Image (cartoon, rainbow, N blue to C red):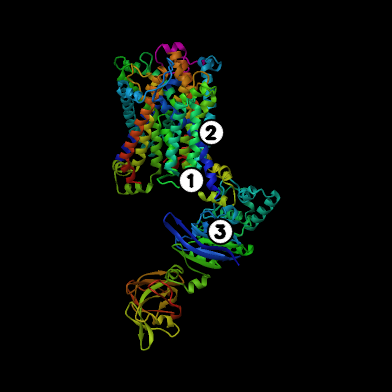
Amino acid sequence: MSHVTLEGVAKSFGSLQVIPPLDLRIDKGEFVVLVGPSGCGKTTTLRMIAGLEQGSSGRITIAGRDVTDVRPGLRNCAMVFQNYALYPHMSTYDNIAYGMKVRRENPESIRRRVTEASELLGLTPYLERKPRHLSGGQRQRVAIGRAIVRNPEVFLFDEPLSNLDAKLRVDMRTEIKQLQRRLGATAIYVTHDQVEAMTMADRVVLMNGGRVEQASDPIELYERPANLFVAGFIGTPSMNFLEVEVAMASGSLALKLPDGSLRELPELVARSSLARFAGQTVIFGIRPDDSSEGQGGAEGFIVDAIEPLGPHTLAIGRIGQSKFTAKLEAHVRPKPGTQLSVKWDWLKTHFFDPADGSAIS
Amino acid sequence: MRDERIKYLFVWPAFLIVLAVSIFPLIYALTVSFQSMRLTPPLPARFVGLENYLGLLASARFWGAIATTSIIVLISVAVQYCVGLALALSLHSNVPGERLYRPLFLFPMFMAPVAVALVARMIFSPTLGPLNEFATFLGFPNLPFLTQANWAIAVIAIVEIWQWTPLVTLLMLAGLQGLPREVFEAAAIENASPWQRFWSITFPMLLPLSVAVVFIRIIEGLKIIDTVFVLTGGGPGTSTETLTLFAYNEGFKKFNLGQASALSFLFLMVITLFGIVYLALARPLMEKRT
Amino acid sequence: MNEGRLLRWVAFLACLVWALFVAAPFWWVGVTAFKAPTDVNGGPTYLPWIDFNPTFSTFREIVAGERGDFFRGFWHSTAVGLSATALAVFFGSMAAYGLSRFEYRIKLAAAIAFAAIAIGGFILLNEVWRLPAPQSLSLSMLAALPTCIVLNRLRLPGPQLGNKDITFWFVSQRMFPPVVSAFALFLFYAELNKQGVRLLDSYLGLVLAYTAFGLPLAVWLMIDFFKSVPLEVEEAALVDDVPRWRIFFEIVLPMVRPGMLATFMIVLAFIWNEFLFALLLTTSRWQTLPVVLAGQVSSRGDEWWAISAATLISIVPMMFVAALLGRMMRSGLLAGSIK
């Protein structure tokens, strides 16, 4: 049974619709990450679940209870904010205990739960400190501690790691994920960082312009993007796109690449649905990771710049008018202007309908 | 949402206090301004229509008060702005002794205008004051600082300048500190002279704030009474009488309440009119850079 | 570089000259307050121990209560100033918080209806039915306010007033020439006095007037302080089901404490120095310092030693306030708020 559901939830400011009706179901114990470029509505969606933002229409339920018109405090969510949102004049202990004190819970149980949470998060030595005397990572732990002691139905995270430095971010990522498993809690996590999304999520919800582009587990998102947007957003460096013409050559399907070369498609790739586009232009996608120097792909790859990364070197250039990036051996250093041939793994190629960007399977 | 109801609780107390203390009496005063109401002799109030207003508009004393007030305000605000900006620039560039100057330059605006005027009265005193002694020392005749109309207005303006330049300095300094440093560094790299930097960067960027500061000072300046009350009492004759002092004299010396109310509403109209014209003129200046 | 150095010298000299100009009057009061009457009447002197022999006699007289009116004025100013400032800052903070956090909508039609009912009702009651002014005013307000609230709920055409307009309404009270409201308030208090409600020349009347006088300033200053507080902290509390009033008192107010302190001092300075209201609303019993000081001119004429001592005492508290504010400002506390 779904633990959190959004049914036709929409949001508009005046006449501007930022989120068209949106449906989303989240299971109990699931770690869902909302990801997308800035302004895609992921934070607004999260805030509507928290009740900090009122939707213009639609229904939200949490644990089977309709909370659409329930105020934030009664939705039994706990939220961790981007800037931690700690109470600056209260010590770590008071920050964690404040909510319970306001709800007039039994002092003994308050003390017990704060102690438990602080031990879990390694905050015990810092209980008397004010937030301004804590490091970024410690502040984030306090914010998480404040969320844990609520024992909520759902944890909501709003870009909680974006203010931490890169190394700490990686550590906290694992820590949050482990914590969520241990508590068996449902978590909805908003980020603009696709690596965070891929590594933490049970299911990634990729949003764009207020709409869900694709919601699936990370590997599927990477291997079978539903459309051009998903394909371009997930993966670094991002996928190469070439406009190609689908042609029939001696009874089998072939591609006419922008450099003019004609490639016959292997049997496995020449799927029936691609045949529908015979004689038309489609968008061909291949990840840089799956393309390298060699025969079998395009011949007219002109290198503009190289980025040696250590384990391998990226060659950035173009094929015809389209930009293209290929992964080369670490020690290959073609000069700018060099023309190379590239090959790719045909099993990892993608095709998209240029009309609506949807994937051709 | 629950906030929908509670939000009104936050503004109601303040709203009701202002309503009770400012708006209530204002309505009453508005009706009084259309009546003939005197406390001495205590005649019953009688509706006279616009008579109070027309009487004022026809009186030379009213126009005199407007002229006096405007002259004092124009002179003093012009000097306040120029000096205040210059001081702010100096403090901002950390002149030697800046730590000492900062509090000193602030002090005058925290003094009661009455107290300031009392001190000025001593300093400008014709017989025992230090200034006239100094003038005599330099060979000037004894100057009639407070007893001759033009001198008196100059003295009032000087007192206003002394007291309120600090406010301009304070606000302009805050504005200067808020300007992005990169722009100045870029200009320094371009080898712009300090003078060029001021006219092409600092001044234009401070223009919106300047417009606001001058507005505040003019509006506040128009209300002047305490300084004049203590320094000259409006004299000699009524030559230094400002609008507020005129209203006070009318209402509390002559107890002509109807007239005084009408006067205060005329005053309100003058200020409103000024405000509208000023803001309309200043709008293009404010919008250009924000 | 040369031009820059020259400019620095000019700036330095200008500041020095201005500093002397600013300091001279302080020196003069400071010196005169310690003079004996004979030293004053002998013409201006400036240097203690060289020009004249300083004496504490005037201060002794004041402390001994021989200048009773002055001593009372000091106490009145303190009592009225602190109470009115506290109220103004408290209610002003509440209003400023509301205006910076929630959205208010008042329909212009409802606001006009309010003004029409209030003014029309007053004229009707006062002129036609001959009710005394305070009663007619209260009644017409009592009629106007609920009507306005009900009208505001209805679907009325026409423009709506938002937070900006309400803020402007508050702040515009400060732009009013005070003589308008001081006069009106005097007339109103006088009417109430006739009916036995003593507001004229009383603590309560003054505090009420000054609270309203300080409110616009407090609202204006506090709005900026509240806007600088991150919203997330309050949202965290909302998610934790902390009631709005506790968020305000226990979370937001402690966060804006420095700003509130600054606002308190600025409002206090304005009220402490205010002259016109005190002049109109007091006669003898509750005169505040500025009125007492102004009275010294006529009552004591050329007793400069006494006037100086009184002036000195009345400005010392504000010098502390100014020094404190200056320190807060240097630490950059108010830099963001003044703009």
For numbered disc 1, what is the local secondary structure? Answer: helix
Q: Quadrant of the N terminus of chain A?
A: bottom right
Which residue is situated farthest in the front direction here?
A: C128
Q: Chain of mark 2?
A: C
Which residue is at the front of the view, B200 or C28? B200
N-term-proximal mark, 2 vs 1: 2
Disc 1 and disc 3 in contact, CB within 8 angstroms: no
Q: Is residue C39 magenta?
A: yes
For numbered disc 3, what is the local secondary structure? Answer: strand
- For the residues labelled 1 and 3, the Cα–Cα distance comes to 36 Å
Is A286 on the left-hand or right-hand side of C231? left
Which residue is the site of mark 1? C153
Of the residues shown, which amino acid type is indicated by label 3? Leu
Is C324 on the left-hand or right-hand side of B97? right
Which residue is the site of mark 3? A156
Q: Dot 3: within a 10 Å radius of its alpha carbon, few (fewer than 14), some, or many (20 or more) residues? A: many
Which residue is at the front of the view, B161 or B180? B161
Which residue is the site of mark 2? C87
Of the residues shown, which amino acid type is indicated by label 2? Leu
Q: Nearer the viewer, mark 2 or mark 1?
A: 1
Q: Nearer the viewer, mark 3 or mark 2?
A: 2
Q: Is residue C55 visible?
A: yes
